[in-house]
């Protein structure tokens, strides 16, 4: 344990009161330091008002008494902890706290002083009998010490209680935020755009009489897409493989509807498919590529999903060779609603992974200005 950790443990020792944490020997060390400071202070006081002996003559005897008293009080508090068990002292009534934090120091002063006198070869009762003023001096010292002890730990308990209440309020606020975020995510996951649903069903109906095989294939792909979407809507966490399953079901369905105008490819190594990946981050990018990149293009185009890693990041990319980006903007041609989707992705990335996670958009082919490349990067999770 280095000096910084030792001092930090010491602050915890004296700020936590009798309910201490840390190794037993560290408690003894800091109790000894506290006793030494008290002994030095009392030595200065005694030497100032009674200069019949030198400072060096007074100091050893004073330190003996302060260490005997301090370690006796330390031991009594430890025994008190054993007797009361693990019940937090913040739950005690005020009279019980007053008795506990006053009786132990007062009793500890008399017992510790008696031990010190015995170590010097004397007897406490004989010493008091020969000098009755000593009894009142010890009593006054014990009362002052007990008052200090009570006020010190009472203040620490009030501070600890306030910190606990603040932590509880913060925990409730964070829980409410998580619930709100989860509710928003559930709405996103469960949402199927009405026009997409109706157009797909209308296409199936129109193909039943003339191309029943194609109609059946389209309906099967639609069922796969719905199944994958519903499974995702019940999950709060998932993997990249889960998101790819939804994206591929969506692309397969659209490929049938758009016939030869839509082609797609997925280039994701098997090992990366097991990477944790939050739901509903990939799918909106795929929908953007179709709706605002390939649908407006007469010849359609290709959507490619890639994933790779660097030393520190996981990168997921959705690229298309469709209409591309308008000049001087970082968003594809789209309706206003799509901008909200991209903003939601950025907000969720920041909430889930911090500022290191980003969504970047770029032109696919700088020479022709066609295509759009959307790349999500987030820190690797160890």
Image: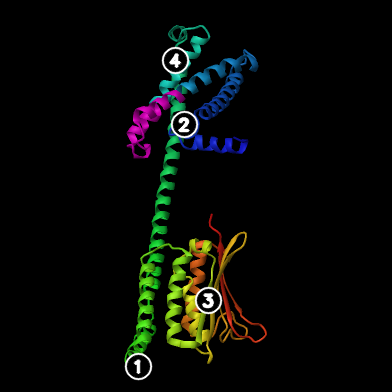
Instruction: Tell me the number on the disc at residue 265.
Output: 3
Check disc 1 and report the residue beneath it. 210
| Cα–Cα span, label 1 and label 4 | 112 Å
In front: mark 1 or mark 4? 1
Residue 233 part of the magenta segment: no
Q: Is residue 317 above or below residue 314?
A: below
* SS type, badge 1: loop
> Going 42% across and 32% down the picture, which residue do you hit?
150
* SS type, badge 4: helix
Q: Residues within 10 Å of mark 3 (few under 14, many from 20)?
A: few
| Cα–Cα span, label 1 and label 3 | 30 Å
- Give the image quarter of residue 358: bottom right
Check disc 2 and report the residue beneath it. 148
> Going 56% across and 87% down the picture, which residue do you hit?
323
Asked whether, in this view, residue 311 is left or right of residue 113, the answer is: right
Q: Are marks 1 and 3 in contact (CB under 8 Å)?
A: no
In front: mark 1 or mark 3? 1
Whichever of labels 1 and 4 marks the residue nearer the N terminus, that label is: 4
Q: Which residues are magenta?
A: 74-102
Q: Magenta segment, principal secondary structure?
A: helix
């Amino acid at each position: 344990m280095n000096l910084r950790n030792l001092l930090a443990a010491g602050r915890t020792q004296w700020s936590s009161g009798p309910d201490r944490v840390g190794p037993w020997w560290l408690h003894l060390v800091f109790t000894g330091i506290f006793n030494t400071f008290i002994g030095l202070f009392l030595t200065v006081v005694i030497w100032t008002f009674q200069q019949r002996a030198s400072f060096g003559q007074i100091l050893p005897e004073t330190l003996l008494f302060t260490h005997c008293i301090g370690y006796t009080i330390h031991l009594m508090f430890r025994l008190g902890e054993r007797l009361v068990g693990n019940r937090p002292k913040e739950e005690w009534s005020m009279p019980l706290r007053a008795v506990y934090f006053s009786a132990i120091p007062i009793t500890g002063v008399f017992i510790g002083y008696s031990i010190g006198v015995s170590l010097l070869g004397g007897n406490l009762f004989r010493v008091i009998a020969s000098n009755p003023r000593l009894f009142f001096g010890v009593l006054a010292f014990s009362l002052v010490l007990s008052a200090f002890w009570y006020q010190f730990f009472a203040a620490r308990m009030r501070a600890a209680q306030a910190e606990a209440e603040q932590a509880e309020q913060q925990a409730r606020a964070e829980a409410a935020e998580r619930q709100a975020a989860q509710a928003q995510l559930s709405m996103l996951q469960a949402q199927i755009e009405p026009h997409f649903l109706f157009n797909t069903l209308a296409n199936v109906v129109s193909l039943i009489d003339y191309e029943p095989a194609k109609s059946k294939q389209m309906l099967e792909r639609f069922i796969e897409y719905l199944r994958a979407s519903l499974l995702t809507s019940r999950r709060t966490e998932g993997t990249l493989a889960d998101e790819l399953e939804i994206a591929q079901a969506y692309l397969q369905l659209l490929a049938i509807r758009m016939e030869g105008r839509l082609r797609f490819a997925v280039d994701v190594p098997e090992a990366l498919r097991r990477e944790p990946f939050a739901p509903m981050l990939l799918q909106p990018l795929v929908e953007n590529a179709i709706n605002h990149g390939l649908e407006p293009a007469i010849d359609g185009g290709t959507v490619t999903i890639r994933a790779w890693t660097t030393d520190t990041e996981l990168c997921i990319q959705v690229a298309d060779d469709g209409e591309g980006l308008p000049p001087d903007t970082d968003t594809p041609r789209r309706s206003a609603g799509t901008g909200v989707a991209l903003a939601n992705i950025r907000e969720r990335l920041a909430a889930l992974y911090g500022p290191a996670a980003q969504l970047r958009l770029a032109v696919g082919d700088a020479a022709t200005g066609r295509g759009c490349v959307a790349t999500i990067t987030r820190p690797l999770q160890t």
